[in-house]
Amino acid sequence: MVKKESAKRGYMTPQEVEAHLKGIGTSNAKITYLRDMINHKLSPKTRDAVYENLAEQYSKIGNYERVEDSLVKRGDYKNAAIAALKNPEVTDFHILTLLHNDRQIKFNDIMAADFLAEISKDWKKYFGEKNGSAANRAEDMALEIYKKEGRHHREVAELELKIAENRGPDSEEGRHLLYNAYERYEILGDNKTAEALLKKYIKLLKERKINTEVAEERLEELRKKKSDLTSRLSSVIAIAGVLGGLFFLSTNITGNAIANVSQSSGNILGAVLLVIGLVAGFFWVKKK
């Protein structure tokens, strides 16, 4: 039935090729059979199906160089790059070159980095339980490209936090990345997130009996900066509120109309602005 359908269609699917492997015991024997198939005249789609099965069998015996080669021959450059990430002898440049050959990524380094960051999120799916180091390599490559290409601080910080979480608090590298992420959020002006990350970093250091003096100083500086910003904002609100309130109240006293605002509405608006200004002024003076 399979032969009849494939003959009618003109090519074999990966599942049909796999059906031919039933009864062949070991992966090495299946590889020999598939390599012999390649030497015969095959339609392009059947050839792709054979290479897909070859890649799967090579993966089972841990020959990632052959996995990569089989996938490249069928034009699957993304999965070839995933296989190459598992091979410690392959350079980062070689992996990036594979991704550049992909039709979607082409020669866009940022898109290549996005792909590397994406597959590292679900690394067990792409690399398997025993290949955590390959996932780490994908993360490191993505982070390096983001920095080199000047990716936005927030995206870099998010990736640094994810890597820090994956490497664990006991890892010096993980703690270093956590500190880097804090610095990036501070540059972005997100002092709330920056303070939370710095507190977490200090806590990790204390748990491991590592000196926290420098980090504590940075936390104090951050809090002072945050306090100064709040103080400046309070002063602006106070001045704007008082002046706005007096303006609306004074115009109603003199009888001058303001656009379509009625006298009663002007009085209410003026009183509200004056109260807001006084309250903000009170907190500003208190902080001073």
Image: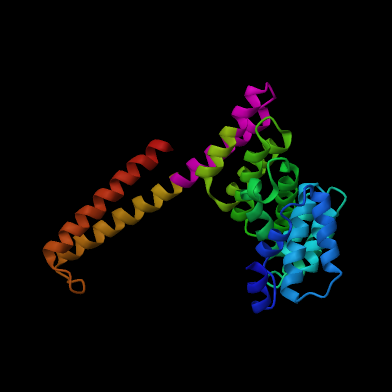
Residue 280 or residue 42, whichever sits in front = 42
Question: Which of the image's four quarters has the C terminus?
Answer: top left
Residue 25 or residue 79, whichever sits in front = 25
Residue 141 or residue 180, whichever sits in front = 141
Q: Which residues are magenta?
A: 201-230
Residue lying at the far top of the rendered structure = 209
Relative placement, left or right, of 263 versus 274 is: left
Query: How many numbered marks, from 0 up?
Result: 0
**Vertical relation: 57 (above or below) 182:** below
Is residue 205 located in the magenta-colored stretch of the structure?
yes
Relative placement, left or right, of 188 versus 36 is: left
User: Which residue shows up at 21% across the image and 74% down it?
Assistant: 259
User: Which residue shows up at 67% across the image and 64% down it?
Assistant: 16
**Vertical relation: 177 (above or below) 47:** above
Image spot of residue 236 (x, y percent): 40, 53
Image spot of residue 176 (x, y percent): 70, 38
Residue 148 visible in the snapshot? no
Residue 210 or residue 106, whichever sits in front = 106
Is residue 74 located in the magenta-colored stretch of the structure?
no
Relative placement, left or right, of 35 versus 163 is: right
- The colour scheme used here is rainbow
User: Which residue shows up at 59% across the image and 28% down it?
Assistant: 203
Figure quadrant of residue 215:
top right
Q: Main secondary structure of the magenta part?
A: helix
Image spot of residue 93 (x, y percent): 83, 59
Question: Which of the image's four quarters has the N terminus?
Answer: bottom right
Residue 25 visible in the snapshot? yes
User: Which residue shows up at 62% across the image and 59% down it?
Assistant: 152
Image spot of residue 118 (x, y percent): 63, 55
Relative placement, left or right, of 153 versus 272 is: right
